[in-house]
Image: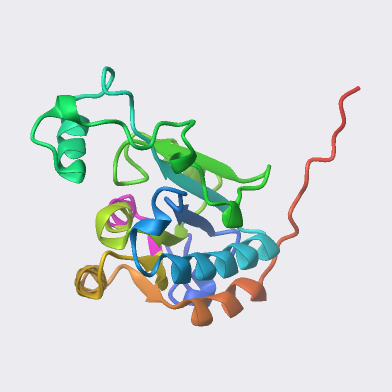
Amino acid sequence: MKHAFGLSVPEKLEEICTPSRCAMIVYDMQAGVVPQISEGPAVLGRCQQLLTAARDGGFRVFFTRHISLPNCAAGVGQLRRAMVWQRKGDPMDTRPLFTQNAPSCQIVPELAPQDDEVVIDKITMSAFEGTFLNLALRDAHLHAFIIAGIALEVGIEPTVRQGADLNYVPIVVTDACGSKNQQLKERSLATLEETGEVITVNTAQLIPLMKTSTIPRIVNTAREA
């Protein structure tokens, strides 16, 4: 840890990856998303390992969900995205795939959020755009985040880039981030690593560090009178 102007500046991963500095973000691991890529089951398994380590270590945990507004409430960008994703030539031929209450929108049961974990709904690719994620992290005095989920080249990369612009230290768990194919994954990781600000690490390297400094989780045991 380096010190300057009254600030502590972490350098090493073990200095950054602590519950007092870092949160865990599980990105769009939804019932309608995970089956879309061939490595979905492998990514799910590694996200389970990371989530267990985060819970045991006392890290704050945030889940994101991509949601679709009803077509009658959607704007130009959302309708255009629906046309692209659904390969339709007319927005009237599209349908919202991830409405909030649809089974496809829900976090997969293997990663079911606990009562003291947060689910953030978004209509954008970056988890920071139009959500309360930045405010929540700032208010908890966090400076970094671990991110895993699906898909790296679609939504995780924009989240990481915006997070870096917000002066967070993003930690991308490479083998716990799914992609459409290996070529897209390698290209996305290469561009992120080129920034010099994004830390890339695999699950086996990260989990032991998450266990070295733990904060007990506080469970709300209050009962109604």
Q: Is residue 3 visible?
A: no
Q: Is residue 169 found inside the magenta-colored segment of the image?
A: yes
Left or right: where 83 falls relative to 138: left
In percent of width and height, residue 11 lies at: 43, 75
- Taking depth in this image into account, of 152 and 206 the one nearest to the observer is 152
- Taking depth in this image into account, of 164 and 110 the one nearest to the observer is 110
Tell me what residue is drawn at x 39 percent, y 62 percent.
169
The residue at the far front in this view is 93
In percent of width and height, residue 181 lies at: 25, 70
Quarter of the image holding residue 199?
bottom left
- Taking depth in this image into account, of 220 and 213 the one nearest to the observer is 220
The residue at the far bottom in this view is 205
Tell me what residue is drawn at x 69 percent, y 67 percent.
214
- The image's colouring method is rainbow
Q: Is residue 181 visible?
A: yes
Q: Quadrant of the C terminus?
A: top right
Left or right: where 224 falls relative to 123: right
Q: In the displayed structure, would residue 194 be above or below residue 118?
A: below
In percent of width and height, residue 66 lies at: 38, 41
Which residues lie in the magenta part? 161-170
In percent of width and height, residue 128 lies at: 36, 43
Tell me what residue is drawn at x 56 percent, y 42 percent.
118
